[in-house]
Image (spheres, rainbow, N blue to C red):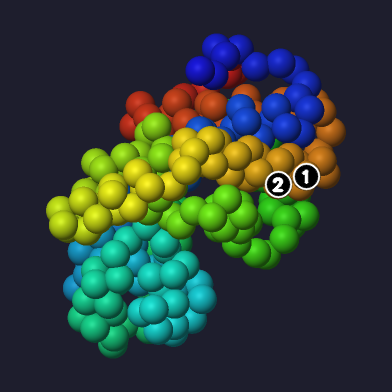
Amino acid sequence: MLPNTLPQALDPLDFARLTRASLVTTGGRFMTARHMDTAGAKFGLPGRVLYFRGRLGALGDVHATVATAVLGIFPAVVVESIWQQTSSVPAAAAAAAYASACHEWGREHLSGLSQPEAVSGPAERIVDAAEASALPLTALLAEALDVPEAVLADPGGGPERLRRTAWPPEAIDHLLRRAAAVPDLAARWHRAEAATDRALARYAMVLSATERGELARQLRMAERASAAGASVTGTAA
């Protein structure tokens, strides 16, 4: 349970723990918004298809097996089908359309934030300090977990999350049986989560304690704005 108020200054690990939900929630909302449908229309793609092509477009024209491995959470048959149906869409164009949907969503939902530079500036410094590697996947591998097992162990995931990401019932049943055979599944998931927190904390050290506290407050404001579907101003709790 996150506290209602945030300290003025945060150490790196507290910053990572307290901003995880805001980063995941706010960062993902545009992906299912109408802006994705609008951006995909020029290619004749619904937003849910642009999500795949646009998100993976940053890697260039990759094979469906690479896309499946990078996304992790979707069954291979879904990704392969989308790749076959959209092979004529250039990766760079799809990535640009995906980015434009994010930009338009941000203008609509976050333009009222009183200090947008208080998010963008410090966030870019953390990104610049980070390694360009698959640290979340590395954390799972260190615990001998794959992505579907992690989804099933996640208190906010479970079988319903797999259903939402197009896993068929028979595959979910198989994954549930496999996950049930994993010793200490929940404990492994928590250790992997803690490892990703430590990774973010390491990179957040480029900010001062007060900068981390301010960024955490601004991220919480952004989460509230995106949830409300309207801009908000003022000071976050």
Residues at circles 1 and 2 in contact by the CB criterion of under 8 Å: yes
Q: Is residue 54 visible?
A: yes
Foreground: 123 or 132?
132
Residue 83 in the image: above or below residue 95 = below
Of the residues shown, which amino acid type is indicated by label 1? Arg
Foreground: 232 or 169?
169
| Residue 202: image tag | 1
Q: Is residue 113 left or right of residue 151?
A: right
Quick one: label 1, few (<14), some, or many (20+) residues within 10 Å? some
Q: Is residue 209 left or right of residue 75?
A: right
Residue 43 point in image, percent of width and height: 25, 75
Of the residues shown, which amino acid type is indicated by label 2? Ala
User: Residue sitting at 42 percent across and 63 percent down?
Assistant: 71
Residue 61 in the image: above or below residue 52 = below
Q: For residue 128, which quarter of the picture?
A: bottom right
Whole-number angstrom distance, CA of label 1 to CA of label 2? 5 Å
Which residue is label 2 attached to? 199
User: Residue sitting at 82 percent across and 41 percent down?
Assistant: 205
Foreground: 74 or 42?
74
The residue tagged with tag 1: helix, strand or loop? helix
User: Residue sitting at 35 percent across and 39 percent down?
Assistant: 157
User: Residue sitting at 15 percent across and 53 percent down?
Assistant: 169
Residue 108 point in image, percent of width and height: 39, 41
Quick one: label 2, few (<14), some, or many (20+) residues within 10 Å? some
Q: Quadrant of the C terminus?
A: top right
Residue 140 point in image, percent of width and height: 55, 53
Residue 190 in the image: above or below residue 62 = above
